[in-house]
Image (spheres, rainbow, N blue to C red):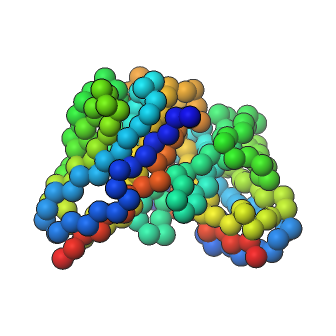
Amino acid sequence: GESVGLHLPTLSVQEGDNSIINCAYSNSASDYFIWYKQESGKGPQFIIDIRSNMDKRQGQRVTVLLNKTVKHLSLQIAATQPGDSAVYFCAENMGDNYGQNFVFGPGTRLSVLP
Amino acid sequence: DAGITQSPRYKITETGRQVTLMCHQTWSHSYMFWYRQDLGHGLRLIYYSAAADITDKGEVPDGYVVSRSKTENFPLTLESATRSQTSVYFCASREPRTGSGNTIYFGEGSWLTVV
C-alpha cells in the first residue's frame, strides 16, 4: 500500500548549520504535502506545505523541495537553532474530500548541537 | 488563544473502563479528526467527521466511538479500554479542501495510559 517514510530516523547538526530532512512517498497520485514539527509533549505544528504543481516553496528559514520524478520530499532548515530540535514528519494527501487520506511518516528526530 | 483544546491532557485508567477524550475547536472548521500516535508509527486515523452528525471510520476505528452533535466538539470514547489503546491521541481539524490545499491543525494531545 501507499506509505510515507523517512530516510533518516535521527539527525544531529551543529547550531548554525543547515539541516536537510528527507521523506520518500510512494503514491504518485499524491498532490499535496505538508511538513510538521513536533516538540516533546506537544502536538504537531504546521511548518510548510507544497502542492504537486510546484517543486519548491520557501518560508521563513525553511524550504521544501518536491521531486515528483523520484517521489521525494525534503525540508531544509537554514541556520539551525536549538529551538529547531524536534521530530519532523511529512504527510501526503491524495486529493480526498475530507483529508481522511493523509498519510503521515513516523518522523525524524533533529538534534541541534551547541 | 483560539484553536483546538483537548482534555484531559493526561489520563490513567484501568482495563475495561470507559474513557472519553474531549476535543473542542474554535475555528468553526468543518472537518475534524482523531488520530493516535504510537512509537515507530506515523499518526493513524481513528475517526473523522465532515460536519455535525456526520462521522466515518478511519484506519484504526475498533474499540472507539465518536459523536459530533455540535460543529465545535468531537469527543472520542473508548468503550472498554484495553492496554493496546495506551497511546497519545490527537484531535485535529481543517477546512474543506480548496485548490491550494488545506493543512490539518492539531491539538496538544491527550496522553492515555491503560493499566
Q: In the rendering, at what x and y percent does residue B15 appear?
A: 82, 71
> What residue is at 44 percent from the left and 69 percent from the top?
A40
Q: Considering only vertical position in the picture, is B74 above or below A92? A: below
> What residue is at 50 percent from the left and 39 percent from the top?
A3
Q: In the rendering, at what x and y percent does residue B68 appear?
A: 73, 43
Q: Considering only vertical position in the picture, is A47 above or below B11? A: above
Left or right? Give the position of A96 relative to A111: right
Q: Considering only vertical position in the picture, is B115 above or below B96? A: below
Q: Considering only vertical position in the picture, is B73 above or below A55? A: below
Q: In the rendering, at what x and y percent does residue A81 appear?
A: 21, 66
Q: Quadrant of the C terminus of chain A?
A: bottom left
Q: Quadrant of the N terminus of chain A?
A: top right
Left or right? Give the position of B41 relative to A44: right
**Is residue B35 visible from the viewing direction of this image?**
yes
> What residue is at 32 percent from the left and 37 percent from the top?
A72
Instruction: Say how many tags the image has.
Output: 0
